[in-house]
Image (cartoon, grey):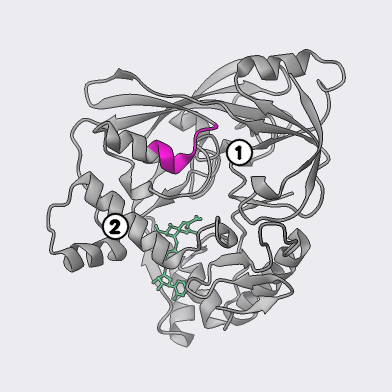
Amino acid sequence: MVVEKNIPLQAFNTLRIVAKAHAMVRIRDVQDVQALLADPTWANEPKFVLGGGSNLVLTGDVKPLVLKVEVRGLRVVGETAKAVIVEAGAGENWHDFVTWTLDHNLPGLENMALIPGTVGAAPVQNVGAYGIELQDRFDALDAIDLHTGQLFTLNAAQCAFGYRDSVFKHASSGNAGAHQPLGLKDRALILRVRFALPKVWKPVLGYADIARKMEQYGVTTPTPRQIYDWVCEVRRAKLPDPAVIGNAGSFFKNPTVTAEQCADIIARDPKVVHYRLDDGSVKLAAGWLIDACGWKGKTVGQAGVYEKQALVLVNRGAGVDGNGATGGEVMTLAKAIQTSVYERFGLWLEPEPVVM
Ligand code: EPU
């Protein structure tokens, strides 16, 4: 185990914010974590688990010990009557993993192609796109408790998945009784994730962007590979490539409101983009709300709102060696957007990324 000191983190966060880790350890397997927890210097130090850094805003140097997850490996590990079980190391790139499954004739993840980040970060916020969420294909994951060093496995119910949410985003209440869900924020390091990919594959085509591609290409019964290609085309057309311009994907969650609140907003803004959910509530498109407040393409300091998608904040200044926006600038812009959306619609948008 090697603890590296004063490590620049610009290459390890997709917003390309300049910051340093005071100390960092690369985790290639469980033994690296166990060695760390056996070391009296580090065992009880605060720790921060870093995946692909694609859902992260760094507002300064990171003081907790950074655990950079680099657990590799992609393999088929079993099957059930209905599914093939594949396992991926937490440090694998998510999109490369999706591509690997299709190369091995194991469809089911194609709608989630090109989501930035790593496999291990995907369950933390239950990533999703174009009608499929991670939880729809999830089998189980192996993790290690950073307090006790114990290895454990969680199934989907134990991960408590929600919209961009899971047990890994919530702090422990401290008095975990039998009925108290135990939050695992800052406590668990995910090592491997297993997915159940359906043996009988059915395309998920409900989203307007996908429907438009079917029409454009004149295809009515697409293959998994065609859906994968279309999702990549759609994403490339409206989401910035972090390799070219720093960003953290959608910066805000789409807010959910009651039917009454929605009726009230529609009365004032008939064009508001909304989706009715099964439970009677309504999801609003945060991108539309932000756009309606005039933010698309705006810049504050070196942080900006992406020209083609108001839900994405970008770092305009970060060249290869450039400094670009600070995390503070990004958060100032985020706050200004939240305030103007609140003033117009009475809704406070919740950020998606972790702010450090
Ligand atoms: N819209 C505007 N102006 C904008 C942006 C959006 O009017 O500047 C409208 C669009 O026209 C559309 C609606 O808002 O009618 C929704 O936009 P879009 O289809 O782009 O999807 P989204 O709700 O903004 C969500 C996820 C994405 C995911 C896509 C596709 C969230 C916060 N975002 O975006 O996830 O890829 O659906 O399923 O749930 C991510 O989480 O990082 C992410 C990219």
Query: Which element carries disc 1, helix, strand or loop?
Result: loop
In this rendering, the answer to whether 170 lies above or below 247 is above
Q: Distance between the residues labelled 2 and 1?
A: 27 Å
Q: What's the magenta region?
A: 91-97
* Left/right of residue 183 with respect to residue 282 in the rendered view: right
Q: Position of residue 343 (x, y in %)?
A: 65, 80
Name above or below for residue 118 compared with residue 164. above
Residue at the disc numbered 1 = 51
**Which residue appears at 35% of the width and 35% of the height?**
100
Label 1 crowd bin: few (<14), some (14–19), many (20+), radius 10 Å: many
Is 343 left or right of 200, judged from the image as shown? right
Label number found at residue 230 = 2
> In this orientation, does residue 149 appear?
no
Residue 209 screen position, x and y as percent = 30, 64
Q: Does the magenta stretch include residue 93?
A: yes
Q: Is residue 50 magenta?
A: no
Q: Where is residue 150 in the image (x, y as percent from the top left)?
A: 65, 15
* Image: 190 above or below 272: above
Tell me where residue 282 appears, x and y as whole percent.
Answer: 42, 65
Nearer-N-terminus badge (2/1): 1
Above or below, comparing residue 116 to residue 92 in the picture: below
Per the rendering, the mark at residue 60 is none
